[in-house]
Image: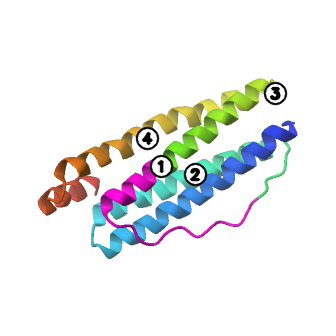
């Protein structure tokens, strides 16, 4: 059985992962309207990954004989000022998720919930990778500035 404090935080993380998925889906739509299919494809993959993260937590909570609490999802933005601003938003989402997961690890250790600590290690590793991937795209977008051909090449690479 998961201690109440840890269970509450796991449910909060689960709901944040679903919100992140929803956020990435909104970004996919934004990039589709710009006809940047590579960026849209990449955002769809992020949507699927965040949804998978949420379901992984969902399954873990149930495996430990606890109850999942699903909250309403807040409406994500539908427009960004530029592809760079959208990716910076995605980066902030990933940094926030990393912070939440790190706090969860600290809480699990403080509560001596070693099973949850072990479970969360996978998420810690994933977040390092996700922040690096988004950060790499942002660096490329900053490097090209307003160069439309550069944007085309990045879009092609993401597809």
Quarter of the picture containing the N terminus is: top right
Q: Residues within 10 Å of mark 1 (few under 14, many from 20)?
A: some
- Sequence-wise, which precedes: disc 4 or disc 3? 3
Number of on-image labels: 4
| Location of residue 19 in the rendering, given as x and y in whole percent from the top left corner | 60, 59
- Sequence-wise, which precedes: disc 3 or disc 1? 1
- Sequence-wise, which precedes: disc 1 or disc 2? 2
Q: CA distance from mark 1 to mark 2?
A: 20 Å
Disc 3, SS: loop
Q: Which mark is residue 153?
A: none
Q: Residues within 10 Å of mark 4 (few under 14, many from 20)?
A: some
Q: CA distance from mark 1 to mark 4?
A: 9 Å
Above or below for 81 versus 151: below
Q: Is 50 displayed left or right of 65 in the figure?
A: left
124 inside magenta stretch: no
Residue ID for mark 1: 92
Above or below for 24 versus 109: below
Q: CA distance from mark 4 to mark 3?
A: 28 Å
Mark 3 or mark 2, which is nearer to you? 3
Mark 1 or mark 2, which is nearer to you? 1
Residue ID for mark 4: 131
Toward the viewer: 102 or 46? 102
- Sequence-wise, which precedes: disc 1 or disc 4? 1
Residue ID for mark 2: 52
**Span of residues in magenta:** 70-92
Q: Residues within 10 Å of mark 3 (few under 14, many from 20)?
A: some
Q: Specify the quadrant of the image occupied by residue 31.
A: bottom left
Residue ID for mark 3: 111
């Amino acid at each position: 059985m998961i201690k109440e404090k840890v269970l509450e935080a796991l449910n909060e993380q689960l709901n944040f992962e679903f919100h992140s998925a929803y956020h990435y889906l909104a970004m996919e739509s934004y990039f589709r309207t710009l006809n940047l299919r590579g960026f849209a494809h990449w955002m769809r993959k992020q949507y699927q990954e965040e949804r998978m993260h949420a379901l992984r937590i969902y399954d873990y909570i149930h495996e430990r004989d606890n109850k999942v609490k699903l909250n309403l999802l807040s409406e994500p933005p539908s427009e960004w000022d530029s592809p760079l601003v959208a990716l910076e938003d995605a980066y902030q989402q990933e940094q926030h998720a990393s912070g939440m997961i790190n706090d969860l690890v600290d809480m699990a250790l403080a509560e001596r919930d070693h099973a949850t600590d072990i479970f969360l290690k996978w998420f810690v590793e994933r977040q390092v990778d996700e922040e690096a991937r988004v950060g790499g795209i942002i660096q490329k977008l900053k490097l090209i500035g307003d160069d439309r051909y550069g944007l085309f090449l990045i879009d092609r690479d993401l597809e």
